[in-house]
Amino acid sequence: MHATKIARTVGPWPVFALVATAQFMVVLDTAIINVALPVIKRELDFGDSTIQWVVTAYVLAFGGFLLLGGRIADLLGRRRTLIAGMAAFTLVSFLIGVNSSVPLLIVLRGLQGLAAALMSPAALSTVLLLFPDGHHRARALGYWSMVATGGAAVGLLLGGVLTQYAGWRWNFFINVPVGLTVLALVPRLVPDHRPERAGRRGLPDAPGAVLVTAGLMAGVLAFSQASEWGWTDWRTLCGFAACAILLAAFVLNEGRADEPLVDLGIFKIRNVAGANGTMAAVFAGNLGMFFLLTLYLQDVEHYTAVRTGLAFLPFPVVLGLTSTRMAGLVRRFGFRPFLILGPALVVAGMLWVSHLPVHGSYLVHVLPGLLVMPLGYGMSFAPMYAAATAGVPARWAGVTSGLIATSQQAGGALGLAVISGVAATVTSSLSHDGLPQSLTSGYNTAMAISAAITAVAALLAVLVIRTPRRPDTPPAAVPTRPRDTAVSE
């Protein structure tokens, strides 16, 4: 009770800043390690086919368990879930920093992603409840989207500086003081959410969490290894089949579970379904884009870690300038136009950098794409969050937050696997020696695939997303339970 009074005294924005810091750490760790991968590969003697799992293990566990994290936040309390996730995230970050084992590093990265899956939906659902009205929520979601996407770009710059001047382990050690600070402040500032079913304990729908995570893992494994095994090899085909079967079993499980990770009725809200599909497509191309450009700059152009980070600096600047202005634009024009225009601009930027030459010019071949893509992302993310959460019943606040974040991370994991697999396949078909021209051809082809995947987001926005009805127009029926209250746009 004391924590709730303090939170009301300081106002919602300091609480927003605190939970946004937690989200920033989560997103930062998706990207901060990218610049350090060549150093980690050399120091720990990673193989070419296993190094991507330093990124994939984190993203996969994060995306696979986000729905479980959202349900835990709803049923056991958002503040409690946020504290548990932050404590685990901080501890695992320290353990990664002192580790020197290749298999253990991948396992710890998976555990770090699991901890992040507790933090992220608890943080976002707290924001949704702090800002219940349209104007302030749109503004908050604009800043949130800047944190969620800008963290990836800032991570590349920070990762470059830390890797070159302090060593790659400080990419993880840096989480420790930040995590301890957040842990000290959360009990004092974040309101103590009391779930309606306070008597329920234990993990809700653990089988569902296992099925969806195993299904995603099978799909990512099949895509990432296809270049080595062959796309028609029995192991690749078995991976795809296992992915389809496990995800189908997950859907069946959700229809029968007493406390499902996802109440399937939520997809009857058209914009929720459309926004999640759009988010998955956009982020599938986003994570692959960062991965490919990082490899191009370091492996082909021979940039240092710091220079690589500086090369991405325009990205968060443009993203921040765009995202912070979206609240007023969304309020005036609605979110649908920006969910069409934003991905279209991202596609244009990706197509520009899909023609990279060996020994290209940064100003001519890279920078224009890094100016256009964040403009599109900045237009897209706040409207996607708004579309995915507008008009959703309060009992779904946590799971809706987990669902949109799951679409983001699961889309990123699968997209990274597809895109890196395509790049490796093209490169190996042209040369087995990893020559610069072969590498560049692989990156260009994969970037074109990233653009095609992102284009699906614009198509979904055209076909599925609809402008909300005016207040004087009766809304479409939404399945509710007794005593539900809606979270307003």
Image (tube, grey):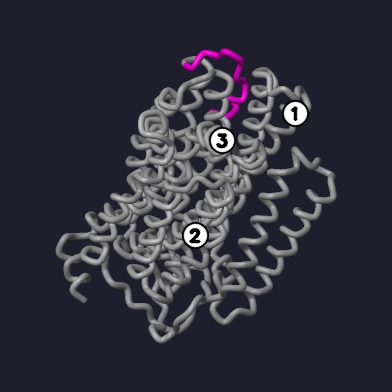
10 Å crowding of disc 3: few (<14), some (14-19), many (20+) = some
Residue 372 position (above or below residue 333): above
Query: What residue lies at 55% left-to-right and 69% top-to-bottom?
Result: 262
Q: Earlier in the sequence, mark 2 or mark 1?
A: 2
Whether 361 is among the magenta residues is yes
Q: CA distance from mark 2 to mark 1?
A: 34 Å
Q: Which residue is mark 2?
A: 114
Q: Secondary structure at mark 3?
A: helix
The x, y position of residue 257, in whole percent, is: 60, 79
Residue 284's spot in the image, x, y percent?
Answer: 58, 44
Q: Quadrant of the C terminus?
A: bottom left
Q: Nearer the viewer, residue 275 or 221?
A: 221
Residue where numbered disc 1 is placed: 428
Q: Is residue 335 left or right of residue 411?
A: left
User: Residue under circle 3?
Assistant: 41
Q: Nearer the viewer, residue 449 or 93?
A: 93
Image quadrant assignment for residue 115: bottom left
Quarter location, residue 386: bottom left
Q: Identity of the amino acid at label 1?
A: Ser
Helix, strand or loop at mark 1: helix
* 292 lies above or below 68: above
Where are the magenta residues, as a range? 348-362
Which quadrant of the view contains residue 184? bottom left
